[in-house]
Amino acid sequence: MIHAAAAAGAIIGSSAAMAKAVALARRLAQLPRPILLVGETGVGKGLLARLIHADSGRRGEFVALAGGELSDSLYHDQLAGHEAGAFTGALRRVRGVFERAHGGTLFIDELPLWPQQAQSALLRRVDEGLVTRLGAERELALDCRLVFASNRPLAALVESGQLLPDLRWRIGEFVIEVPPLAGRAVDIAQLGYHFLDRARSDFNLAGPVLFAPEALERLVTYTWPGNVRQLRGVVEWSCMQAALHSAERIGVAHLPDYLAALDVPSVALVGTTRRELSAWAFERAGHDRRRAANLLGLHPNTIDRHRKARLA
């Protein structure tokens, strides 16, 4: 599914580090085995899980369940569901997440937050592919692709007592490392413009349509502890600030204070970073060097020089 990969590039990024993760995800999408995504909070693990589902060819639903949504007392109901009359107040049959994801993909997020009892219940379902609704007389054999996500390696979770050792060996065979946003300059620019386009559409704004070079330099040199999630919030805020001043570009003054005050080199977009950004801008601009230069605030000849150097 080429369109799925293109969508992933738009919302995750296309740097070499992220391209490696996406390529591995697409290769593993066809395998009937659990996949584990490991990366910092906010790097886009949920988006990568959706890409895996799209590339898997499965026609069922994509269902997501985060560890923070699980209750110590109601985890069985959340996982397996219940029959009408199974308990006081159960007026109708309710399907659990495994049944809802039959024929599709179940994305199980935030493993460190899963209660131990829920992990035990999960372990059996991973092993056997069977669930029993509360109050039901028979088991259901279900077929769903399982994608797990954690912000820490499983070995560390086992060592700290947050993960059952047996579960580690069931779900930790096919692992995809999702890189943090820091240092991925081309992804920051790509995602920044993607979120700018989305913000203008969501807020029904005519502008701004560009980042000023000084603002873009601050974005690509910042460390982004909140990763993609934080970047999206910053772009939306800055877009609104620029729109209030009828600005065509998001400038330094429109950024949050901690970014506006960031001390950056006089020429932050240099070397490999500038070459990668030039190549990306050239593609986004439909191979129009002047439009590409406008995206980055560079001279058209600079775009040509760096793009050709990268291709050489």
Image (spheres, rainbow, N blue to C red):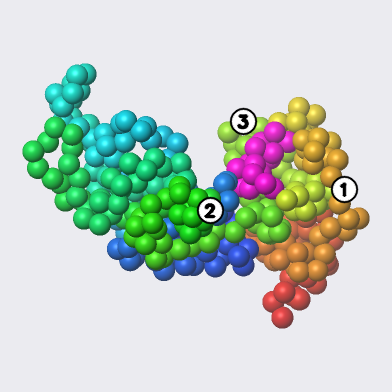
Gap in angstroms between the C-alphas marked 2 and 3: 36 Å
92 versus 80 height, above or below: above
Name the mark nearer the viewer: 1 or 3. Answer: 1
Label annotation for residue 203: 3
Disc 3 marks which amino acid?
Phe
Instruction: Give the residue pinned by disc 1.
Output: 263
Spot occupied by residue 84 in the image (x, y as percentages of width and height): 15, 26
Task: Give, as a three-letter code, the residue at label 1.
Answer: Asp
Q: Quadrant of residue 92?
A: top left
The answer to whether any part of residue 13 appears in the image is yes
Quadrant location of the N terminus?
A: bottom left
Instruction: Please say whether residue 64 is visible from this viewpoint.
Output: no
Considering every residue shown, the one lying at the far left of the view is 137
First in sequence, mark 1 or 2: give its number: 2
| Label 3 element class | loop
Q: Is residue 112 left or right of residue 120?
A: right
Q: Nearer the viewer, residue 112 or 46?
A: 112
- Residue under label 2, please give it: 152
Using the rendered view, name the quadrant where residue 63 is placed: top left
Nearer-the-camera pick, 237 or 201: 237
Sequence-wise first label, 2 or 3: 2
